[in-house]
Structure formats: structure tokens, C-alpha cells
Amino acid sequence: MLQGVFTALATPFLQDGSLDVPSLLKLLRAQLNAGVQGVVLLGTTAETPTLSTTEKKQILDVCVPEIKKTGCQLIIGCGTNCTASTVENVRLATAYQPDAALVVTPYYNKPNPSGMVAHFKAAASVGVPLVLYHIPGRTGQKLAAPVLAALLKEIPQLIGIKESDYDMAHVTDTAVAYKNRLAYLCGNDDLFPQFLALNAAGIISAAACVLAPAFVKIYDLFKQGQTQQAFAVFAQIYPLVKACYLETNPTCIKYMLSKLGYGAPAVRLPLGETSTENKTKIDALLAQTPKEFLV
């Protein structure tokens, strides 16, 4: 069962836009040293749509051995809005023996219910366990309850959901209905305590790139029954968590990482540089955040 804090790892670039492998390894090792239970490679935070096939393979070749030797769990992002390429990505991921493949609901196409089920069945046919990534704000597609029920009934390889819906009624319904069926993983960093209160298995977090020690501490305290202490830590980091999303992820996170010594703040187009105004806000918040909560 997937459980704990999973960092959605960013991809450091040099200022010229090329892959910065030393900073990538430094960032990964900082996550592992912070005690995260898992790492997600090639997710949205990695700017995967802008990576070439060669670069994706290089990231996996560099990072997977580091992850495997620690015993951390590994999830590899594989989802696209094309079923054939999604299946091919899952097939390629099998060489790295991930604990699961992360597959987003197809964006832009807005598949009908039968197409949605067929898409995930095709991805599952490769044999790798799947985590469904539900993020209506980016895909324009919210899974209706009957479609989710059909997916979970017909696809036993579907072992988890990364839930990034802000509709807490939907979140609660799903958490209660499938509490014994799958790993329900928070996909919204700013709702981590709420998800833990709903018995979520953990979180897949972009902000953990910067705040892994804090997220691990929150998770550990909550699981020990020290819920007030867990919330106290969350309250201290909450302003910086919110600042991670002042602009489209991972723009601000890359800027924060650059200030902490993890490469340049470079992102690839169509993402652009963080605004001067938001850099000023982030600088102030980084200075106020306890150092033990930062990577």
C-alpha cells in the first residue's frame, strides 16, 4: 500500500534550459535525507511535457538507483491525453520497476465515460499498478461518481488516487466510500491536514520539493495521534505553501529551490519567469520559515 509523503520531484535546468543533473541529484538526495516515504518522477512538477524522451530516460537512469537503494517507494508519471502514448509510457516505466504509474485523467479531450474506462483499462493492461491523478482544475474533467465506481470495479490494478479536487464534499464521499479499496493521496498541499483527518494514506506534494522536512514531520505527528502539534507545524509553513502557487507550478517552487542552492530558477516555455513582485514575497516568506522545515 502506498503510504506517506511522496515528493513530486522538480527538474532543475541550467540557465540555458538544459538538464542540470548535479542539481537534480542534490535535490533528490535532500528529499531522501528528509525521510520522505516516496518520490514521484516525471510528474507535472517535473515539467514533463517539455522533456524529450532522451531527457526522461536520463532522469530515470540517474534517480531510480538512488531511490531504490533507500527502500523508498517510486511512482513514475505516465499519463497523457493519448491512450497509445500513455500505454507506451507505462510499458517503458516497467524497466524501472516502479511501485505504481501515475496516470492523469485525459485532459482537453474530455473523454466520455466509456472512453475513460477503456483508457485506464489499456494503461492497466501492461501490468503495473496505477494511481489515478484527478485534477479537474488542469484537465477540465471531473470524474462523476458512477465513472469512478466503474473504474475501481473494473480495474483491480488501480491501487490509488492522487486527489487534487477542491470540492471537499467529493473528497469526503470518495474517502469514505473507498476507505478499504485504495490509497487515497492528497494532491493539494494546502489541504494536507484535512485529507489526513479523512484517513488519507498520504500526499503527493510539489511543495515538498522545498518543505520535505516539514511535510514528513506533519505526517509523522498526525500518525502518532499528535494532531494539534501536526497542525502547528502546518500553520508555520502554510504561507510558504500558498506562495508555491502564486504562479503556475513549478515556477515559484523552482525560484525557491534556486534560493536554497538547488540550481537555477529556470523553467521551460510555455512557463515564464516568476514576477519580481512574487519573488519579493517569496524572499520574505523563506526568511520567516524555520530552517529545519526547509531542504
Image (spheres, grey):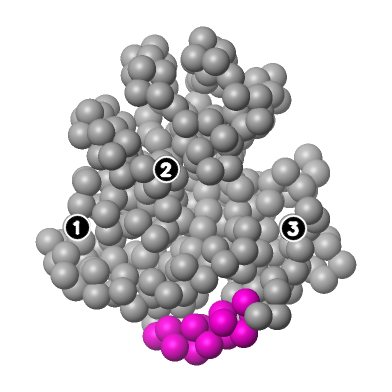
Residue where numbered disc 3 is placed? 271
Residue where numbered disc 2 is placed? 165
Q: Which mark is residue 240?
A: none
Please give the range of residues in magenta. Answer: 278-291
Residue 115 placement, left or right of 88 = left
Residue at the location (83% across, 62% down)? 17
Question: Mark 3 touching mark 2, by CB under 8 A?
Answer: no
Q: Amino acid at mark 1?
A: Lys
Q: Amino acid at mark 3?
A: Leu
Q: Nearer the viewer, residue 12 or 47?
A: 47
Measure the C-alpha gap from mark 2 to mark 1: 23 Å
What element does badge 3 sit on?
loop
What element does badge 2 sit on?
loop
What element does badge 1 sit on?
helix
| Magenta stretch, overall SS | helix
Residue where numbered disc 1 is placed? 223
